[in-house]
Amino acid sequence: MDGPVTDRGETRLFAGVELGGTKCVCTLAAGPGNIRDQRTIATTVPWETLPAIKAVLDEWAGSHGFCGLGIASFGPIRVDPAKADYGQIGATNKPDWEGADLLGPLKAAFAVPIGFDTDVNGAALAEIRWGSGRGLDDFAYVTVGTGVGVGLIVHGKPTRGFSHSEIGHVLVPRLKGDDMASVCRFHDDCVEGLASGTALKARLGGRSLSDVAADDPVWEPIVHTLATMVHDLACTTGPMRVAMGGGVLSGQPHLLPRINAKLEVSLADYMQLPGYGAYVISPELGTMAGPLGAIALAMEAVESAGTYAPR
């Protein structure tokens, strides 16, 4: 769905909440080309941030109205509707947020369909609707920032089992000679612990990133780890395309070609990847992937409720 959704000639609006580790972005929109309002709220502690989110939504409900709400949150989150902890934050590194109920109060306050998922799954759905994943039912969105998050869409839906996917915590073989301590408090050899922005900062040892050249050895374990993660994705769910962005890749145009090249070597002609050497690409929505991901979740919820059929 590329344009705004209309009902009897009137544009229908959706509210989205992208809850990140440092900030929350609330968006009121009919689509990427029709954003009516956007507010940023600091992610501090639940008893401050969550009432501030509800206040924004209350204002929009009273002034504009919205037909659906999407909540795209940092994780892990509880996504099984059959369990009592559905809609809550799981075991997170974010102080005071474990067990915080994101969904319950908003579900009680707003009588609209609500979509709830991880921020990266939301961003992946947004890229499929409006960006680098257009036309695809099997797609992965990767953000490499403070942590490593992967939104994985299989047959048009985010993967589900007992939980959402946590591919940033997949264990990978280290690059030979890499003995840096993992920055993940849970795992010694996971992708996030070795290749996130936090890991890069530890690898730099106080050096400024602006002073690090493209051929600096610090990039070798980053490239190795991210390419290994994509190798695992290709060999398991086989997304047609992988969009990879985030702070670590920002301003480093050499990384994606190196990741693609490393991936081709590691697969060793066992599988033929789509993309002709550019299987891993940049997201098209940039910094708007997250906020629009929450809008995409709202649209998915309304579609599932049968309120409209835009496609």
Image (cartoon, grey):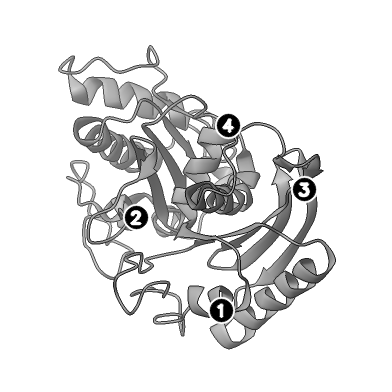
First in sequence: mark 4 vs mark 3? 3
Q: Residue at x 36, y 49 (%)?
A: 195
Q: Residues within 10 Å of mark 2 (few under 14, many from 20)?
A: many
Label 3 and label 1: CA atoms lie apart by 26 Å
Callout 1 environment at 10 Å: few (<14), some (14 to 19), or many (20+)? few
Checking the image for residue 192, the label placed there is: 2
Tell me, for residue 35, which label it has, or none.
3
> On the rendered structure, is 73 left or right of 187?
right
> Residue at coordinates 40% horizontally, 52% vertically from top-left?
148
Earlier in the chain: of badge 1 and badge 4, it is 1
Q: Amino acid at mark 4?
A: Gly
Q: Position of residue 27 (x, y in %)?
A: 70, 57
Q: Who is closer to the viewer here, 41 or 111?
A: 111
Mark 2 or 3, nearer chain start? 3
Q: How far across and how far down the image is residue 205, in percent?
A: 43, 59
Residue 108, which numbered label?
A: 1
Question: Crowdedness of circle 3 by 10 Å Cα count: few (<14), some, many (20+)?
Answer: some
Between residues 168 and 174, which one lies in front from this camera angle?
Answer: 168
Q: Nearer the viewer, mark 3 or mark 1?
A: 1
Pick whichever of labels 3 and 1 is earlier in the sequence.
3
Where disc 1 sits, the SS reads helix
* Residue depicted at 43% across the width and 27% down the height: 136
Q: Quadrant of the C terminus?
A: top right
